[in-house]
Image (cartoon, helix red, strand yellow):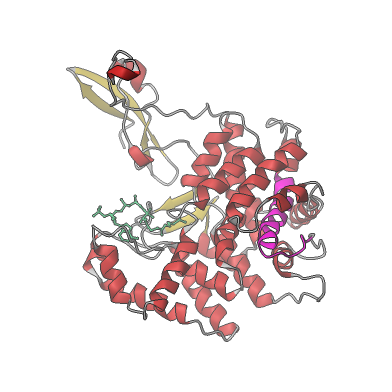
């Protein structure tokens, strides 16, 4: 492996160091490019070739369909771990001991109360507001109720900020759901584990006992583990770049929620179900929608297909498809949407357009069907994704601050007008 790369420009030669990652990924360090070449920058719209940081959290290989957190495979983590255990691993670097886990879980529970005045903000939202908008705003509002600055050099301060947001975020997420549905805002039940508590936060009504369904809890736990981190995706990069300005954890996380909302990112799980429902309402003609997706003049895309990084298969989609089948069997469910999804997948995987462009089902293709089976309303799907991704955002923000990374500030190639004189109205 060469340890430098050479660039020739205008008869001059420049050398740049090449680094090797622990999984043999290679990166050319161009941080001196602009200064040594007197102005040359790289242009990489969408950052398809640009590494924004070095990270120890997540490794993924899009060609081989590998996803690992801190060295542990996603397959093993979903089989053997719990959401909170994996969160600890992702955030702090190692799997917790029993004592560490007990403390972590208890400390999170200790942070599950939210200032009652936050409820005034919740009821200020129209009921029609999208829960992702509410969640983003409420996460940001936490800053106002917790104004202390986190000293990133203090392990204790960092730990306290981590457990605080992990304790409060599911409560805020459930409030967004309950506001939309005219339900009283619920409190956490600290006798329950993290995922069971999340379920009761969402669904418990004051007039009835809420029975925890262990099958549903297990499915939700697995689904959320699958979403915990995915290295430098759109929302995570957003969290890191917002935090790089010195913005606090809650403000940075709020921007991550907004980035996740988009239909090309976390909003895809909602878009998948809406697409499947539309196909069902239209008579279930899968081929028609395959043709629409292939038509360059039609903006329609097969939602839940394709991925920026995974070009052979998304390992999370494999796990989720199995989890979906298990859940339907365990709960003895039958959803016509699932049959349409399976047909769509089968047709697309044989179609040259999708095969040649390496478009495979991604994590969102089946996650929405599981959420639907768990009675999560469609507009809450992306909120569930956000709850799952929270540990990843926290870990990436923490790593970025601990590394002392500089403020993120990309360059651009200006292609606009050159200097021209300002003309008064009557001359324009
Ligand atoms: N349906 C039909 N055609 C598609 C699809 C799709 N879902 N995805 C990509 N293509 C086509 C594009 O039209 C393009 O064709 P062209 O080369 O002829 O112009 C080619 O495949 C490459 O697509 P890009 O958009 O350039 O690929 P990119 O890596 O930028 O985008 C993305 C990846 C955004 C995920 C895209 O595949 C997509 O829009 N998928 C649907 C939305 C979705 O499921 N998003 C969830 C992603 S996973 C997550 O965020 C958790």
Q: Is residue 171 magenta?
A: yes
The residue shown at (37%, 36%) is 27
Instruction: Identify which residue, 417 or 386, lies in the foreground.
Output: 417
Q: Would residue 190 appear left or right of 221 to someone viewing this image?
A: right
Residue 240 sits in quarter: top right
Q: Identify the image quadrant of the C terminus.
A: top left
Q: Can residue 94 be seen at all in this image of the molecule?
A: no
Residues in magenta, as a range: 162-186
Q: Position of residue 401 (x, y in %)?
A: 60, 33
Q: Is residue 219 magenta?
A: no
Q: Would residue 126 appear left or right of 385 to someone viewing this image?
A: right
Q: Identify the image quadrant of the N terminus.
A: top left
Secondary structure of the magenta portion, mostly? helix
Ligand 1 in which quarter: bottom left
Q: How many marks?
A: 0
The residue shown at (40%, 25%) is 31
């Amino acid at each position: 492996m060469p340890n430098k790369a050479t660039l020739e420009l205008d008869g001059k030669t420049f050398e740049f160091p090449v680094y090797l990652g622990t999984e043999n990924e290679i990166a050319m360090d161009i941080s001196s490019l602009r200064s040594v070449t007197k102005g040359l920058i790289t242009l990489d719209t969408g950052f398809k070739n640009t590494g924004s940081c070095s990270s120890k959290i997540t490794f993924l290989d899009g060609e081989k369909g590998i996803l690992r957190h801190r060295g542990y495979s996603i397959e093993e983590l979903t089989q053997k771990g719990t959401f909170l255990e994996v969160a600890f691993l992702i955030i702090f670097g190692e799997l917790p001991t029993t004592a560490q886990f007990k403390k972590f879980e208890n400390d999170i529970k200790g942070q599950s109360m939210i200032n009652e005045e936050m409820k005034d903000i919740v009821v200020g939202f129209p009921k029609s507001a999208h829960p992702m908008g509410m969640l983003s705003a409420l996460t940001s509002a936490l800053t106002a109720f917790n104004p202390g600055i986190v000293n990133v050099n203090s392990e204790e301060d960092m730990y306290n900020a981590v457990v605080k947001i992990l304790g409060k975020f599911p409560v805020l997420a459930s409030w967004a759901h309950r506001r939309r549905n005219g339900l009283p805002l619920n409190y956490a039940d600290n006798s329950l584990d993290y995922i069971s508590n999340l379920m009761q936060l969402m669904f418990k009504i004051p007039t009835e006992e809420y029975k925890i369904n262990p099958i549903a809890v297990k499915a939700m736990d697995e689904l959320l583990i699958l979403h915990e981190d995915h290295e430098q995706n759109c929302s995570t990069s957003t969290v890191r770049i917002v935090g790089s300005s010195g913005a606090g954890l809650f403000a940075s996380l709020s921007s991550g929620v907004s980035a996740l909302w988009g239909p090309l990112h976390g909003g895809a799980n909602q878009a998948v179900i809406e697409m499947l429902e539309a196909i069902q309402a239209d008579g279930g003609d899968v081929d028609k929608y395959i043709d629409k997706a292939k038509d360059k003049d039609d903006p329609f895309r097969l939602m839940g297909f394709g991925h920026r990084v995974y070009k052979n298969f998304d390992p999370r989609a494999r796990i989720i498809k199995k989890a979906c089948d298990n859940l339907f069997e365990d709960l003895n469910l039958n959803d016509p949407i699932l049959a349409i999804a399976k047909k769509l997948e089968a047709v697309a995987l044989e179609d040259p357009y999708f095969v040649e462009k390496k478009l495979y089902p991604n994590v969102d293709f089946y996650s929405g069907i599981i959420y639907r089976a768990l009675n999560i309303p469609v507009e809450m799907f992306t909120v569930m994704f956000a709850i799952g991704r929270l540990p990843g955002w926290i870990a990436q923000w923490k790593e970025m601050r601990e590394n002392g990374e500089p403020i993120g500030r990309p360059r651009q190639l200006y292609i606009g007008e050159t200097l021209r004189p300002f003309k008064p109205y009557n001359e324009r």
